[in-house]
Amino acid sequence: MNFLFIGDLVGRAGRNALHKHLPKIKEKYKIDFTVVNAENSAAGFGITPKIYEELTSLGVDAVTLGNHSWDKPEIIDYINTNPNNNIIRPINFLKNSPGNGFKIFQHKNGFNILICQVHTKLFIDIPLNDPFYTLDNEILSLLDANKANYSFLEVHGEATSEKNGIGQHYDGKFTGIYGTHTHIPTSDSRILPKGTAFQTDIGMTGDYDSIIGMKKDNAIRRMRTGIKSNRLEPADGEATISGIVITKNFDEKVSIKSFQIGGIINN
């Protein structure tokens, strides 16, 4: 099977790029299952029910979030009233947080696919449970019991060291582990020693003529002055779709391919 993972979708530019390129990407790589991180899809901060339904109508199978999960509070009501949604927020959010940190999808071919997201703690200013403890207690038993034929862990966080630590620790447990959040793709896609496909960060889907997807002037003004009253807005130039394709068939070895399509870093 071929699995597509698309990095942080930033604003309208990112959504437009997805409309334009997703059908061609899915056809080119013969994609069976698609996951998009969309925590920055609504003007750079959060996601709305309308955008979530727009993504599913494009053929996105699962939508992941992150530290901006609840920036648009209407998504909380949507999750609570639509329990069969395919939105996945970090599994180590505090107890009683809305939504779910993982979901097992049954593909039409009969295989079960586990999609999970965890949030790292370094340089993050939201309350979180320990990512290792949470994964150990909520996910490993499912994997050990073979509840999923394929399993993927998205690690949302700032520090490359922490993403690598989680990747190395759970090597051999998941089919693939990949990072999001920094909006910059790393060039280290590889297979870890115990067989898990890994990339530290798969980048963003947004306008790269920007400061991590935001218009440059206000972002730089914040850096120079330390004043955060300057409102950040998503850059609106042509966006690049950044992501990975992970392929795994039965007992064959897993493979991973990184790509950037469109915009100024088109590969």
Image (cartoon, rainbow, N blue to C red):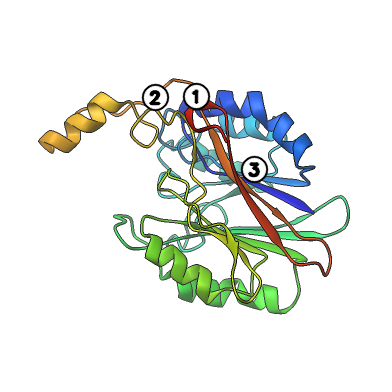
- Residue type, numbered disc 1: Ala
Q: Residue at x 51, y 73 (%)?
A: 168
Q: Earlier in the sequence, mark 1 or mark 3?
A: 1
Image position, residue 173 (x, y; %): 64, 74
Residues tagged 1 and 2 counted as in contact (Cβ below 8 A): yes
Q: Which residue is mark 2?
A: 235
Describe the element under mark 2 as helix, strand or loop: loop
- Residue type, numbered disc 2: Ala
User: Viewed as shown, does residue 48 lie left or right of 71?
Assistant: right
Res 37 visible: yes
Image position, residue 98 (x, y; %): 51, 52
Task: Tell me the CA gap for discs 1 and 2.
Answer: 7 Å
Query: In the image, is residue 63 above or below residue 138?
Result: above
Task: Tell me the CA gap for discs 3 and 2.
Answer: 32 Å
Q: Which residue is mark 1?
A: 13
Q: Which residue is mark 3?
A: 82
User: Viewed as shown, does residue 238 lie left or right of 44?
Assistant: right
Image position, residue 248 (x, y; %): 76, 60
Query: In the image, is residue 262 above or below residue 79?
Result: above
